[in-house]
Image (cartoon, rainbow, N blue to C red):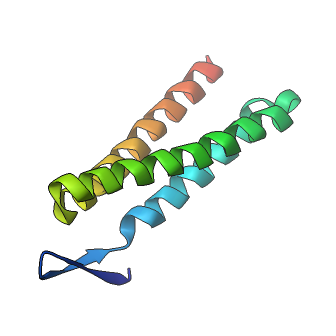
Amino acid sequence: MSMRSCRTAGTQLSVPSLPPVLAVHVANTTQTYAAQMAPDSRGPGMSLFAAALFLSQTVGVLLTVFFYAHYGAIYAFTLVTVVLPVLGIVMRMRIKENALKALE
């Protein structure tokens, strides 16, 4: 895990680059799951997935900048570090739930 440093209010902070790595894993998992879920409409599904991916990145950056500007770097990075693992866990539970329903 690499370390980045960021400077805010005269204080140097070390921030791990773990959240971007988690975002890539979440995107890969959802893309694979979406491709397997509806093979008949894979083209439109992948187009919607790509649009949602890019739009969510834009919104995520805007929200992070807002939190960074109003509350500081610690809160902005803490929010991202908490939200991404929670999103991954919820996604895992939903995928497992859907897989169990499919077996019934």
Above or below, 71 relative to 74: above
Give the side of residue 67 with respect to residue 59, left or right: left
Residue found at x 37% / y 73%: 17
Residue found at x 69% / y 47%: 32
Above or below, 2 relative to 69: below
Above or below, 73 relative to 101: below
Can residue 2 be seen at all in this image of the molecule?
Answer: yes
Q: Nearer the viewer, residue 36 or 74?
A: 74
Quarter of the figure with residue 74: bottom left
Q: Position of residue 15 (x, y in %)?
A: 27, 75
Q: Position of residue 67 (x, y in %)?
A: 25, 52
Image quarter of the N terminus: bottom left
Q: Nearer the viewer, residue 97 or 83?
A: 83
Q: Position of residue 96 (x, y in %)?
A: 51, 33
Most extreme residue toward the top, as rendered?
104
Q: Position of residue 20 (x, y in %)?
A: 45, 64
Residue found at x 40% / y 42%: 87
Can residue 36 be seen at all in this image of the molecule?
Answer: no
Counting labels gives 0
Quarter of the figure with residue 34: top right
Image quarter of the C terminus: top right
Give the side of residue 56 with respect to residue 32, left or right: left
Q: Nearer the viewer, residue 99 or 50?
A: 50
Give the side of residue 18 with respect to residue 70, left or right: right
Residue found at x 47% / y 40%: 92
